[in-house]
Image (cartoon, rainbow, N blue to C red):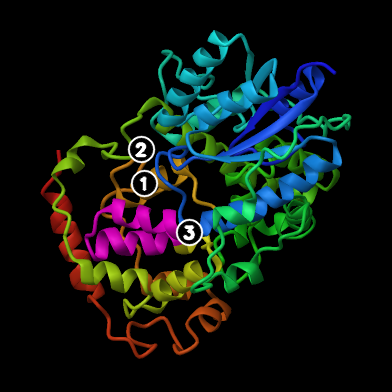
Amino acid sequence: MAAPTLVLFRRDLRIADNPALTAAMRAGPAVALYVLDDSADGRPLGGAARWWLHHALTRLGQELAAIGVPLILRRGDQNQAALALAEELEAGGLYWNRRYTPWGVAADKALKAAAKERGLAVESFAVAYLREPWEVRTKQGGWFKVFTPFYKASLALGEPSAPLPSPTPQTRPTVGDVSDRLKDWGLLPTQPDWAGGLRATWPANTGAAEDRLVHFLEGAAARYATDRNRPDLDGTSALSPYLAFGEVSPRQIWHATRHAAAAEPALAKGAEGFLRELVWRDFSTNLLYHFPDLPDRPFQERFERFPWADDPAALKCWQQGRTGYPWIDAGMRQLWETGWLHNRVRMGVASFLTKHLLLPWQAGEAWFWDTLVDADPAQNIANWQWVAGCGADAAPYFRIFNPIAQGTKFDETGAYLRRWQPQAESYEPGAAGIRPFVAHAAARERALAAFETIKD
């Protein structure tokens, strides 16, 4: 049998539209490796994402087994584990799909050099985004800092390439008992088991991502342009965690949506708005790639001088959904129970933290990283900076979401309030019997005054 080719999985936990896997199986026989490396995302995964990863790897293992590819699990430094396994298996090649975070790029560059020194054939592929970060340029050859021109320039490049089908099954190579056991990694919470709401929200079956995409395209997609802002409705795709872990690719979503809209013209407007969000995902990654200090510094330098507050009690009230504002508290309770939060509510709770409480965006970003099943490095950082007003293409500093008006406007039926804050009969502060932590009008004036101190 020919020397095996090792394919390294990261946030691409699927077999269809996976060019690294497809190429490895052609060179083959392919052996898959996933390494639980706490530095892979620049920091350890949060609790909710670890829960998701357990089930995503279970699904991946089942899909790989069906095409004859063994999945090896290792824990530790990703590069060391990959090189060690390649030596154990006497592999001839090492393939992976590219990453674009600063830490990911550095690690992959080092891995490529080390693998070539050992005589391994090395190949990397593009599939994580619609475009690679260096593809979308300004007319002057630079990088975009504003989304709308980025969006137009991305569309001007034409349709993204078509997704690859699932690979043809291979004869399974014999690798022996060389894998960690997934259950030994302790990704699932036990004492206490806080994941009941996650289990009830997210199906664990193989094919869940595809099922959700079909469900969206056959239903809510036609109303997406209007319903996407309504947390009381099933108006979004809720595909974000599957995208975050690569259980579905952006190219799969893009072309499935285009195909559905071509077959049903009534989907056209909703499809356009939905696909725009995929380009926003690309934009966030472009920002982190071209501005690698984004995790630690505000995109707009003047915010280095912003007078953020240091108030642990306020942060705790926000985290626990005890601010006294039903719109905010409902959102934070949904986040804790399901590991997910509707985007309209995400913007509301983030605005409340950074503008009503004047707490630094990094505190909210860290909480989202720990509690979201769809926590994605670029998305989390770029979106928090956007809401805080210090990011690229950020909302104007004087745009401070009104947590009372937001709830009344976007939860027209009251279903969201009844589901997540049933003690409240309205979105008025204190309606759930919790004393408001701050008064809206006073907090708004305080925020505006703080922003005035850093005006250019």
- The residue identified by callout 3 is 47
Residue 7 percent across, percent down from the top left = 67, 28
The label on residue 159 is none
Q: Which residue is mark 2?
A: 392
Q: Is residue 353 magenta?
A: yes
Whole-angstrom CA distance, mark 3 to mark 1, is: 25 Å
Point out the frontmost of discs 3 and 2.
3
Task: Tell me the CA gap for discs 1 and 2.
Answer: 6 Å
- Quarter of the view holding residue 115: top right
Q: Nearer the viewer, residue 37 or 51?
A: 37
| Range covered by the magenta-colored residues | 346-373
Residue hosting label 1: 386
Q: Secondary structure at mark 3?
A: helix
Nearer-N-terminus badge (3/2): 3
The residue depicted at 37 percent of the width and 74 percent of the height is 320
Question: How would you rate the neighbour count of disc 1 (Cα within 10 Å): few for under 14, some for 14-19, many for 20 or more?
Answer: many
